[in-house]
Image: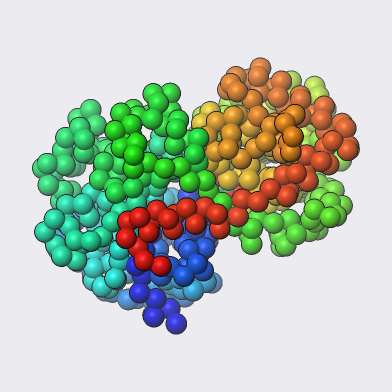
Amino acid sequence: MIQSVKPELVFIASEMYPFSKSGGLADVLGVLPLTLSRMGIPVAVITPLYGRLSTSAYPLRLVCENCPVGYPWPTISADIYQADYQGIPVYFIDRGEFFDRRHYYCTAKNDYFDNCERFIFFCRAALSAIQRLDFPVSVVHVHDWHAALATAFVYFWRQHDSFWADVKTVMTIHNLAFQGRFSNRLFWNSGLPDEAWNMDGVEFYDSFNLLKGGIAYADRITTVSPTYAQEIVTPRFGCGLEGILAKRKDALVGVLNGVDYSVWSPGQDTFLEQTYDLDDLSGKAICKKALIREMRLAPNLENRPILGFIGRLRGQKGIDLLLDIIPALMREDVGVVVLGEGKPAHEARLLDLMEKYPGCLCAHVGYTEELAHQIQAGTDIFLMPSRYEPCGLTQLYSLRYGTPPVATAVGGLKDTIVSYPLPGTTGFTFAESTPAIFLQCVKKALTAWENKALWKKIQTNGMRADFSWNKSAQRYLELYADLGLKK
Ligand code: ADP
Ligand code: GLC
């Protein structure tokens, strides 16, 4: 049945859950296309065939051998594989020397030296596949810097190639801080015409900026929450691109991400020792006990709040703020659990603190999907002191798991958490990313936790909140319809 899907909407992205994942981008790609497909849109996804891809549950089929790509030199080609993911076709771009590596983008120390070539190749190969396989495409929807340049190619090709003449593009920014900035010399063999090299195109202070290309040439630009859409046109959050974003403000819109509740629901979560739901939270206490065992936390913490952090250990996520307040938190007699990996300096500091507070601060440096679910369920409070947050998904998961978040009031966190003591409170937000203000907010949450009735209310408010994809997918549908995609 999959062969009969003739995609009119094509997503191009560097990650897609469950095949590949380094963060929320993958989660979004794992569910938004499916939701749109269920709404009747013929959709496909194109993504790289990484060496570390998880495809065992989804047999791959070669659908185009030696598909000519024409980059970085004319004879180069890609093999295109296809899998059926719950009824939608997913196409994988295979070129071993670019994608068959241990990591997606970088080692612990450095970005891969050839990321520019890798992802221009990916964009060009994805567009070649669309044309070779003769998709009746009307909208190409690209995500983040890795896929951004596809919009520029479509923009220039549609001026002289009838295949692209009516094709429109949407660029979604999941994180403006990652732009794909490279030496200007790499522009000259990218295959873009010389006229793209200007300050309203891909040029950024004499460097080649792939995300800027996406912003410049896409027909519509979206980002993943309404507040972030407002923030990124200002110097504080614009990462240097606020100028071009402000220029393109009429094409820019914020559409909030949603949650795949078939993956993230405590009532049907197979990773949990005991499932639970709104009507009966008793399973959450069993998950807490299991987490205490699993992470080797002190058994007496069963009766004290345990705070969880899941995320990349980077400045964006405010992991340093959390590490700064660990000694003060330890004086509150609470447990802290951290899951993540990232900057070696943060990892080292985390491990040092863990030695200092055995049984009270427990960390798993790395990431497993299973532990992420178990921490969401087994902790009492979720910490997300991000300095900026385009949307944030982990706080949405924590709401559903009855683990109220303490988070900075930025971006999507501001849009998704009703802060104490507002009516309908679901969590606690604070305005400024400083350790003192963060600590003050955590203490507010700890005081609320002591009041069992109040706490249960906050938990159940959050569990009831509905961030399913349907509403947001509807917004995307309107956007595509504006660009000519017929339903
Ligand atoms: P971001 O995309 O900025 O990392 P989000 O909150 O949008 O943050 O999404 C995070 C998603 O990635 C969640 O599903 C979370 O469990 C997962 N995650 C967190 N850290 C890692 C990691 N090191 N590797 C893979 N996935 C991770
Ligand atoms: C990015 C952002 C995060 C967002 C995710 C999915 O990685 O940092 O806030 O939720 O993309 O859109």
Q: Quadrant of residue 264?
A: bottom right
Give the image location of residue 414, x and y in percent: 58, 34
> Where residue 388 sits: x, y (%)?
51, 31
Residue at image coords 30%, 66%: 137
Left or right of 372: which side holds 151? left
Circle count: 0
Give the quarter of the figure containing the C terminus.
bottom left
Please tell me whether residue 398 is drawn above or below residue 361 in the rendered image: below
Residue at point 27% right, 51% down? 151
Looking at the picture, does residue 30 appear above or below residue 431?
below
Which residue lies most toward the top here? Answer: 436
Q: Nearer the viewer, residue 300 or 348?
A: 300
Residue at 82% across, 37% down: 455
Asked if 42 appears above or below 144 in the picture, the reply is: below
Query: Horizontal placement of 36 versus 382: left or right?
Result: left
What residue do we see at 21% from left, 52% from top? 155
The spot of residue 459 in percent (x, y) is 77, 43
Q: Which quarter of the rendered picture does the N terminus lie within?
A: bottom left
**Does residue 296 show up?**
no
